[in-house]
Image (tube, grey):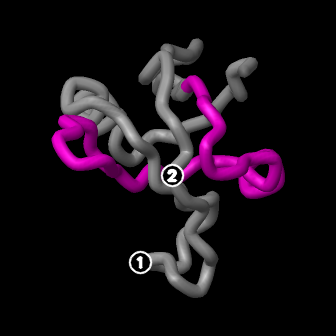
């Protein structure tokens, strides 16, 4: 991150490995989660992909693609509310 930035880097595990193959560093995405009682919710409207974490580098052998995203501290707190729930994404246009 640039000097003086208030943004954070945060790991996020995306539910679908195959779809995550479409991602590249620098892309902006919107994060969604399925809710336990049905339906879905927007987790965060916009984050930027910093890095795709290779499977061998991951902290565990869980399924799903681990990515590092650049986001505000408020958005990091929002993602933490969805810990353990499946996270999906939409790629935002440039």
- Residue farthest bottom in this picture: 56
Q: Secondary structure at mark 2?
A: strand
User: Residue 7 at what x, y percent from top left?
Assistant: 26, 37
Asked if residue 71 lies left or right of residue 76, the reply is: right
Q: Nearer the viewer, residue 31 or 6?
A: 6
Against 56, residue 29 (above or below) is: above
Q: What is the magenta range?
A: 1-30
Residue hosting label 1:
59
Asked if residue 91 lies left or right of residue 83, the reply is: right
- Residue 89 circle label: none
User: Residue 1 at what x, y percent from top left?
Assistant: 33, 50
* Residue drawn at the location 31% of the way across and 47% of the way down: 2
- Residue 50 circle label: 2
Q: Nearer the viewer, mark 1 or mark 2?
A: 2
Q: Nearer the viewer, residue 66 or 37?
A: 66
Quarter holding the C terminus is: top right
């Amino acid at each position: 991150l640039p000097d003086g930035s208030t943004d954070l880097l945060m790991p996020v595990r995306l539910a679908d490995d195959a779809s995550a193959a479409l991602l590249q560093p620098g892309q902006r995405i919107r994060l969604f989660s399925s809710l336990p009682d049905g339906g879905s919710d927007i987790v965060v409207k916009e984050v930027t992909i910093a890095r795709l974490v290779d499977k061998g580098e991951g902290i565990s052998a869980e399924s799903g693609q681990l990515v590092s995203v650049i986001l505000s501290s408020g958005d990091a707190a929002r993602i933490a509310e969805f810990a353990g729930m499946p996270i999906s994404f939409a790629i935002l246009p440039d």
